[in-house]
Structures are given as C-alpha cells and as structure tokens.
Amino acid sequence: MSSLLTESDLIHEADVVWLEDTDKLDYVRQALDKTRRRNTRPPYARDGRMIGYALLAGTAESDPDSGLYKRRVFFLLPHDRDSDPDGVYREGAPGEAVDPRTIEPRHPGTKTPRSQRGPATATMPA
C-alpha cells in the first residue's frame, strides 16, 4: 500500500501505540498495512522492526472483499539512520519517513528538518 498518506486514509484511527521511545528517533517510516484485527498489535513481516501502530475505532469497517482493515504501521529498516548513522540516510530520509513527534491519530505525520536532515538542514537545531 502507498506510504504517502492523507487524512482520508486515517479517518478511523483512534490511537497510536508506540513500542519504542520516539524521542530518540529522527524519523519513522509509515505505511498502511492490511490486518485481520483493528485493535491488537498487527503482525510484522518486514526487515527491521516495528516502532508503533495505529488502533482503529470500533466503527471502522473492514474491506468487504478481503475482510481486512487498513491500519498505519510505523517501522525502521536495518539501513535507516538510527541503526546506520553513516549509511545511505546519513543525509536525507526515505520518502515515507516522517518525524514521529508530528504523528497523531487521524493525521499523517510531517517531514521536519530533523527527520530530513540533509546538507541544508544538518546545522539546524533539532
């Protein structure tokens, strides 16, 4: 599913659950995953690790064809800045990366100088 999210993708979110302290992370990746349940920890099948996930309201309806719910999942991959600070994302960030401090239920996160930290923003305060 697309990771460039709009508020209309997230209208059924009730809460966001963080599995790690996001104050230590410059960015997290976000994507919509299809899951069987709306309010339990979703399965995680990517490399890397799940950082958090959204819980859906009881009024959220599953897809009529698949019976699955679309839920936002936050994650990092092994080559992301937190695990490999001198790697490919030493400057810049993946397209789906947003600052975790800007994430709220029903609102996609935003890119900030901290999350994007590139040559033009490397000297800006966090």
Image (tube, grey):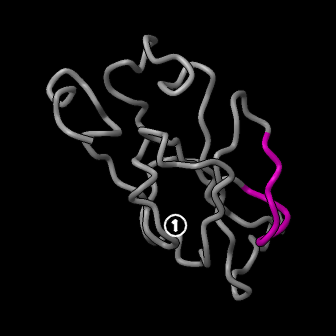
Judging by the rendered image, the residue that carries numbered circle 1 is: 9
Give coordinates of residue 88: x percent, y percent. 43, 14
Q: Residues within 10 Å of mark 1 (few under 14, many from 20)?
A: some
Q: Residue at x 74, y 67 (%)?
A: 69
Q: Is residue 5 left or right of residue 117?
A: right
Question: Is residue 36 within the magenta segment?
Answer: yes
Q: Is residue 57 above or below residue 120?
A: below
Q: Residue at x 14, y 26 (%)?
A: 120
Question: Is residue 45 within the magenta segment?
Answer: no
Q: Is residue 80 left or right of residue 18?
A: left
Q: Quadrant of the C terminus?
A: top left
Find the magenta span and give its range. Answer: 34-44
Q: Residue at x 61, y 78 (%)?
A: 14
Label 1 sits on a secondary structure element that is: helix
Residue type (three-letter) at the residue carrying disc 1: Asp
Give coordinates of residue 57: x percent, y percent. 68, 82
Residue 42 falls in image quadrant: bottom right
Foreground residue, 58 or 81? Answer: 81
Q: Residue furthest bottom?
A: 59
Give coordinates of residue 16: x percent, y percent. 60, 66
The chief SS type of the magenta part is loop
Foreground residue, 44 or 114? Answer: 114
Q: Is residue 45 left or right of residue 16?
A: right
Q: Residue at x 76, y 74 (%)?
A: 62
